[in-house]
Image: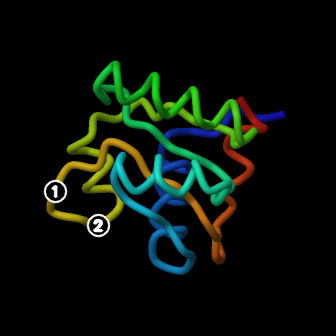
Amino acid sequence: MRRRSSMDINRAIRVAVDTGNVVLGTKQAIKNIKHGEGQLVIVADNCAKDVKEDIFYYTKLSETPVYTHQATSIELGAICGKPFPVSALLVLEPGNSAILNVNNEE
C-alpha cells in the first residue's frame, strides 16, 4: 500500500467538509461519539491533552477510528475552510471523499 501524503489527506478532509456531513469542534465531536454517531474522528496534533484523552476514551468505547493529523488546530481549520481553529472533527457522512480510507493506509 502506498502511504498517503498530507496533501491527499488535506484534500480528503476538505471534500468531506464540502460534500459530506462533518461536525467541527471537540465538544460536538465528543457529544456525537457518546451517541454512537460518526465514522472517523480527526484530531489536530496540538489538541489539548485532556480533550484528546476524552476523545480517545469515547472512541474506544464506540469503536470509532481516530486519526491524529500532523497539522495544528489553526492549520486544520484552514484545511476545513474555516477562519477559526479546529481541534477535532467528526465525519458523520464522508460525501464524495475518500477520508474513511485514511486510517486504513497508515
Q: Amino acid at mark 1?
A: Phe
Disc 1 target residue: 84
Q: Residue sitting at 58 percent across and 50 percent down?
A: 33
Disc 2 target residue: 81
**Above-or-below relation of 4 to 98:** above
Q: Is residue 81 left or right of residue 106?
A: left
Secondary structure of residue under mark 1: loop
Q: Position of residue 53 (x, y in %)?
A: 46, 22
- Residue nearest the viewer, comparing 30 with 75: 30
- Residue nearest the viewer, comparing 52 with 104: 52
Q: For the N terminus, give its image quadrant.
A: top right
Secondary structure of residue under mark 2: loop
Find the residue positioned furthest to the front: 35
Q: Nearer the viewer, mark 2 or mark 1?
A: 1
Q: Position of residue 100 (x, y in %)?
A: 71, 53
Q: Position of residue 69 (x, y in %)?
A: 46, 35
Q: Residue sitting at 54 percent across and 68 percent down?
A: 16
**Image color mode:** rainbow
Rounded to the nearest whole Å, what is the CA distance between mark 2 and mark 1?
A: 9 Å
Q: Which labelled disc corresponds to residue 14?
A: none
Q: Residue sitting at 68 percent across and 30 percent down?
A: 60
- Residue nearest the viewer, comparing 17 with 23: 23
Q: Amino acid at mark 2?
A: Gly
Other-residue count near label 1 (Cα within 10 Å), few / some / many at <14 / 14–19 / ≥20: few
Find the residue positioned furthest to the bottom: 19
Image quadrant assignment for residue 51: top left
